[in-house]
Amino acid sequence: MRLAIVGVGKLGLALLEGVTARGVMSAGEIGLLDANAGRAAELAERSGARVLTPPDLRAAERILVSVQPRVFPEISEWLAQENAGYISTMAGVSTATLTRRLGTKRVVRVMPNLAATIGLSQTAITAPREAEGAGDLAFARQLFGSVGDVYDLPEHLFNAFTGMSASGPAYAAVFAEALADGGVRMGLPRALAHELAAKLLVASGELLQQRAHPGLLKDEVASPGGTTIAGLEVLEAAGVRGALMGAVVAATRRGSDLGKDQE
């Protein structure tokens, strides 16, 4: 068994679908283990992967740990296998903590975001030399490359990446919801306002990637004395920039706190 996925939530499912759809590995090479045994069985039947129990992990070459950080101490005893490499998506759990609890330095730490479910994730990745030498780092790059872009990042920046990129879809959703509410306030039907807000964010993302700095796009849209600059004035007065920066800071600090809980 090339890969055991422990924790088959949205991310685990996205990886299962991504690697099989892109031919990275076949479903028959993947095993699924989840606290919800019924869900694991359903996904296994649908995909062709196999259902696992904890003792089955002995046969796994690599184990993807995709569970909530708070449950990791409880399951680490049976997760620890002598000859396996590990890939962790747990927010705040350092490679040092993974090494200590799993008894091996063959650990890769990754941080994707929810866009993995549509093949557009941004994933940070880091690992000690032992994981690189054993091929675990290259394997993880290939794995997460099947669901988006992968960025090699020093571990001390992981919590900042989590606070910005991994948490970012939620911030964007709040922004879209607020835009739609503004449209409804001014008379647009709610369904239309929601559709416009979602498509606006998608299109704006494409435009931003074609420009060297976000401010350039803002300046292109905001003509002198026009409607956009009037709206921007309100955003500045409300401190929207500062609030978004504060959200990233708060999420980064929370990631650090989660890591301390594991020490």
Image: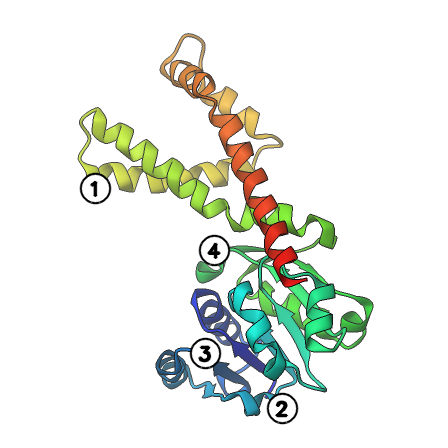
Q: Which mark is residue 115?
A: 4
Residue lying at 75% horizontally and 77% vertically, measured from the top left: 104
At numbered mark 4, what does the secondary structure look like: helix, strand or loop? Answer: helix
Q: How much space separates mark 1 and mark 2, taking CA atoms?
A: 51 Å
Q: Position of residue 106 (x, y in %)?
A: 74, 74
Mark sitting earlier along the chain (4/3): 3
> Given the image, on which type of amino acid does mark 2 rest?
Arg
> Could you tell whether 66 is left or right of 263 in the image?
left
In contact (CB < 8 Å): disc 3 and disc 1: no
In contact (CB < 8 Å): disc 4 and disc 1: no
Q: Position of residue 164 (x, y in %)?
A: 56, 44
Q: Position of residue 241 (x, y in %)?
A: 51, 27
> Could you tell whether 133 is left or right of 11 in the image?
right
Farthest residue in the top direction? 225
Q: Which mark is residue 191?
A: 1
Foreground residue, 139 or 106? 106
Q: What quarter of the picture does the C terminus occupy?
A: bottom right
Count the marks.
4
Foreground residue, 218 or 66? 66
Residue 44, by quadrant, is bottom left
> Given the image, on which type of amino acid does mark 3 rest?
Asp
> Could you tell whether 59 is left or right of 131 in the image?
left
Mark 2 lies on residue: 58
In contact (CB < 8 Å): disc 4 and disc 3: no
Residue lying at 18% horizontally and 27% vertically, measured from the top left: 187
